[in-house]
Amino acid sequence: MKKLFNIIDQYKGVLPSALMVGIFMLIPILIIVVYSFMIPNPNGGGRTGFSFDFFQKLFFCRDLFDNLVFSTGYLKIFFRSMWISIIAVIVSLLVGFPVAYYIATQNADRRNFLVLLITIPFWTNLLIRTYSWILVLRDTGLVNSMLISSGIINEPITLLYTEGAIILGLVYTYVPFMILPIYASLERLDIRLIEASRDLYTTHWGALRYVVIPLAMPGIIAGSILVFIPSIGAFIAPELLGGGKNLMLGSLVQLQFSSGRNWPFGSALAVIIMAIVLIALLIQARNSRKNGTEIVH
Amino acid sequence: MKNIITLIGASALALSAGMTSAIAEEELFIYNWTDYTSPDLIKKFEKETGIAVTLDTFDSNETLLAKLKSGATGYDIVVPSHNFVELFIKEDLLQEINASKLSGYENLSDDFKNSFWDTGNTYTIPWMQGATSFTIDTDAYKGDIHTFDLLFNPPKELQGKIGMFKSANDVISTAQIALGIPLCSENPTEMTKVLELLKKQKEHVKIYSSDGILERLVSGDVAVHQNWSGYSIRAREKKASLAYAFPKEGVPSFSDNLAVPQGAKNYDNAIKFIEFMMQPENAAIQSNFAGYANGVKGSAKFFNDAMRNSPEVNPPEGTNFIFTKACSEKGIKLEAKVWESLLQ
């Protein structure tokens, strides 16, 4: 008994945060997990009971005639989401790395100012920022009308409601999450290492390849994961910029809770997205252990 | 900088002052479809009763169902469509209002006293009625607009410029009417035809969305869009070449209803609002704003000219209006399957 009090006494400092995590994170997740095994109610909600229906539903579906057939429908949605998220990560990296490098090489005052600039978009609501892209990209929008009036094209090119538009929306929203961790690791980079490598006759590219990138690796990995995680479950960009024509995972979950009226399946999908995120985080944790470099936030 | 801080402080004060006064007052929380509640109507109600109204909005019956089903409380008035009313009653989400005992009930038109979804108005009174076909830009297409062929077998000039609702029930009902298949069909062969039609149409569809229809039509982003008749009036007012179609195959139509959800905190105020809405003058204010018919007798004489003369409210002679239906569990499952395979 006394031992127990000792333990509580020892950890009382973390009690508030433990309560926060428990009430606002673990319990909701638990509810979702429980729901995913329930039997769907025809009008939403779930009946108590235990079913693995959702698992079967991922690979097989009952067609309109109620025959069980193998179906790649959900897998297609899954791979579409993965594909779009991975492209978004790559584009974010290509855009984010030079920006982070540029910021890291400025003097301290300028650096702080530039980092502030990076965060400015977050002051405006995400929904409004995404709607603005509609005005820019649509057939009668800024890009098309400029191209037409300058005589480069005659007919508007379809930019909006495409997968490209979704990727643009994701990159635009999440690229700061790529820039900031890379900046954090480049900021501590000793410029003399680059000078040393140049003294040893490497090219510009060589210095980047063998000195800068390896040292920025923890930031690159952290940034990639920070962009990948919200992209895989994204809802706003696919709905508004993708035209809702081809589902992604986030929209599929929403559909189960609205017209699909299958809350357990929606919950199961949410659990699957969480599992993907967890796997991504585990890979990162393993990597950073292997490299012996922990990510410093 | 100091100025800004004073400003923030002042507005925070003003905000908290506003909140305390709101708590002291009588309140009414309305949960209605987006862009569907006349601001003048709310102002008039607030002035006459001293009740402060708060408005929140949703985008589909399914959203309303999911929200109430999840146990959300705090709403005093909700607005389900006719084809969802029975379901809401069955799921025990609505309270009885016994409208026949309320003042002003004699003003309701007989059609809505004996509606198939709530005979005798135990739970609901009618709010607005309109059509759910489509709006088309007559500059983009010159021929006869009153056919669903334009949506499902679009001519060259409309291909890739079609907008559809993002609602399984609305899209599938329309396809069923276009094909001459009964609504809420439980026949897999018939539903396969629906899916084939929609899949073929998808190549020419630009977007599935029930939001932002007006902007897309007015900016010319789409040339045809599935639309509600009242909303089409507002699009036409911004762009004169937009017209509303009353397809010869039949026009899907709806009647939305006022109801009081279970757990409403201000039941008495909700009843006051329902009685208020059964007065012809007030129903007309709402019709003038939204561009839909209402179920209250004698309201037409309060219509403004724009409402009285608009082609969207005065369909061609012999138009066949078809009220969409509440599907059975089997019908809903088939619909959900068709919808998911369409969007995969």
Image (cartoon, rainbow, N blue to C red):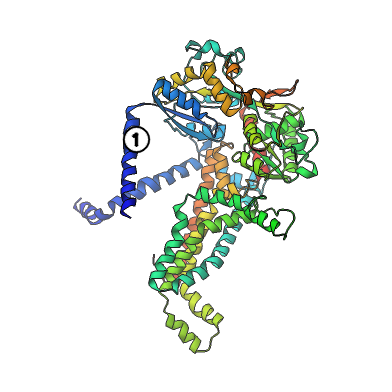
Q: Amino acid at mark 1?
A: Gly
Q: Chain of mark 1?
A: B
Q: Is residue A116 left or right of residue B132?
A: left
Characterize the local packing of mark 1: few (<14), some (14-19) or many (20 or more) Cα atoms within 10 angstroms. Answer: few
Q: Position of residue B187 (x, y in %)?
A: 72, 30
User: Residue A224: in sight, yes or no?
Assistant: yes
Residue B181 position by quadrant: top right
Extreme residue in the left direction? A2
Residue nearer the viewer, B117 or A171: A171
Give the residue drawn at x 67%, y 50%: A139
Q: Position of residue B158 (x, y in %)?
A: 75, 43
Residue found at x 44% / y 82%:
A193
Q: Identify the residue under disc 1.
A: B18
The picture places residue B204, in percent across and down from the top left corner, at 73, 45
Please tell me whether residue B272 is drawn above or below residue A117 in the rendered image.
above
Residue at position x 48%, y 23% in the image: B94
Could you say whether the residue bearing mark 1 is in a helix, strand or loop? helix
